[in-house]
Image (cartoon, grey):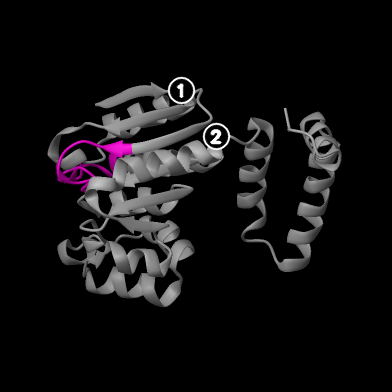
Amino acid sequence: MIRVEQEGSIDILTLAGPKRNALSLALMRALIDALQAARGRVIILAAEGPVFSAGHDLNEMIGCTAPQAEEIFGVCTELMHIVQSIPQPVIAQVQGGATAAGCQLVATCDLAIAATDAWFATPGVKIGLFCSTPMVALTRAIGRKRAMEMLLTAKPVDAVTAAEWGLINRAVPASELERETRELALSIAQAAVYTVSLGKRAFYEQIDLPGAEAYAFTRQTMAENAMAGVAQDSMRAFVEKRKVG
């Protein structure tokens, strides 16, 4: 259901579930476990098959009870929290469609690269199930008006537009998707683990704070960072014009 591979300092987690990688309870729980168990410096989240993920498994929702529905969306919310709370940056490698909760997962990842023929949509409104939880990550990635248009119209957005809107970092030819994603991961993996993990945590803690509070928080964070051994050693090496590490 989740294929786990290691390439040096990179962990590659590949969605390999049925029904176009639908985010069933089992798949989401397996992904949570894989993310928490990852020990690489960077994680790539990829997918098998023609699409990245078609979103929730609707078969689990038909005829479900209120507690069952709350469990589904609770586990989904936990998954999104895990993606952003683990110390490693998570890069989505997207091919084909990423719809509903699949689009939410891409929007939640720290970074995302997609094939130019990939597409994104939040089509729940067409089946009477408004994409309320996906809109949390979507709105924060692309802004209110664009998110509302996607949510209300269910129209798909192509990868080039998604890059312009900020849903993904960039769109690349499908033949270059894997190479481009790994190059990005390797460039991040060169930095110190402590520095990257502290930076990721600080990014999400400050992002929704008012400006003054964000500066107060990041001032303290940067002071903590500057006192760390890895920063002291690296700054000293830079000033002395010698190779770091």
Q: Residue at x 73, y 67 (%)?
A: 211
Furthest toward the front, the residue is: 241
60 magenta-colored: yes
The amino acid type found where label 1 is placed reads Gly
Task: Tell me if 165 is positioned left or right of 195 in this view.
Answer: left
Q: Secondary structure at mark 1?
A: loop
When asked about the image quadrant of residue 158, the answer is bottom left
Q: Residue at x 42, y 27 (%)?
A: 11
Foreground pick, 233 / 27: 233
Give neighbour class at mark 1: few <14, some 14-19, many 20+ (Cα, 10 Å). few
Q: Quadrant of the N terminus?
A: top left
Task: Tell me if 53 is positioned left or right of 31 in this view.
Answer: left
Residue bearing the label numbered 1:
8
Q: Are marks 1 and 2 in contact (CB under 8 Å)?
A: yes
State whether the magenta stretch is mostly helix, strand or loop.
loop
- Mark number displayed over residue 189: 2
Foreground pick, 32 / 223: 223
Foreground pick, 37 / 64: 37
- Mark number displayed over residue 240: none
Q: Residue at x 20, y 36 (%)?
A: 48
Give neighbour class at mark 2: few <14, some 14-19, many 20+ (Cα, 10 Å). many
From this view, report whether residue 45 is shown above or below residue 229. below
Whole-percent x, y for residue 20 in the image? 16, 42
Residue 201: in sight, yes or no? Answer: yes
Magenta range: 46-70
